[in-house]
Image (cartoon, helix red, strand yellow):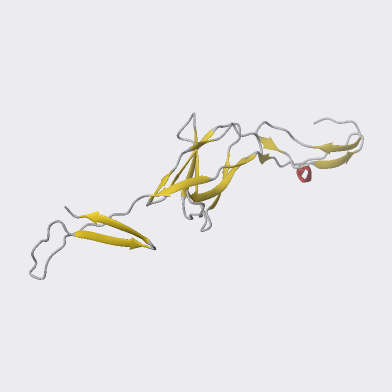
Amino acid sequence: LNLHHGTYQIWAEKSGFICDIGDSLEITTAAGQSLPNQNIVLSLYISQIEGTTFLNNGETVGTVNITATNINNAEQYFSTISNNYGNYSLTVTPDIQYEITATKQGYALDETVTTTILEYEESVVHDLFFTPLPSSISGTVYDEFNEIIIGATIQAELLEEPFIISSD
């Protein structure tokens, strides 16, 4: 860069990157002076997707696998695991629209989320909601002589709500 003598603030620009004010240079040049190794740092511009994972009753659910996939290129994705309190954060490439999916054994995601096209340094919040999948047990009812009893009623109680199943 050829300059006249004087004091300058020097920075670099490139699409997809940012030059923080602390990474720019203030230099003073004299006539005919050469200043080698005046290096400038550019940082990748990023976007953020964050949120909390909840059960559909409002309780948080932790250790959920979260994936944000580029809707135009499924090979480009970012993933993380929510913490014990259900909070998650993904650093993603800007100028892209993402589909957010989440998985946790024993739970079904109520719906996937599609983001808007994220701008540079934009941070968006997308909370995700899950429904617990039903549990099941199986077995056979026997009498004391090891004979199968057909038509017995099996009962299970969860807090105050009885749940009756027929074993026909």
Write down the quadrant of residue 122 in the picture.
top right
- Which is more toward the observer, 142 or 82? 142
Position of the N terminus, as image quadrant, is top right
Query: Is 99 displayed left or right of 123 in the figure?
Result: left
Where's residue 115, x and y in %?
A: 55, 35
Determine the residue located farthest toward the bottom in the rendered image.
144
How many numbered circles are shown? 0
- Kindly tell me whether residue 5 is visible in this rendering: yes
- Which is more toward the observer, 64 or 120? 64
- Give the residue displayed 11% in from the left and 67% down from the top: 143
- Give the residue displayed 78% in from the left and 43% down from the top: 21
Where's residue 46, x and y in %?
A: 63, 40
Write down the quadrant of residue 144 in the picture.
bottom left
- Which is more toward the observer, 163 or 147? 163
- Which is more toward the observer, 37 or 113? 113
- Give the residue displayed 90% in from the left and 31% down from the top: 4
Where's residue 165, x and y in %?
A: 25, 55
Vertical relation: 1 (above or below) 140? above
Where's residue 64, x and y in %?
A: 46, 51
Query: Is 46 displayed left or right of 167 in the figure?
Result: right
- Kindly tell me whether residue 34 is visible in this rendering: no
Query: Is 76 displayed left or right of 136 in the figure?
Result: right
Vertical relation: 141 (above or below) 108? below
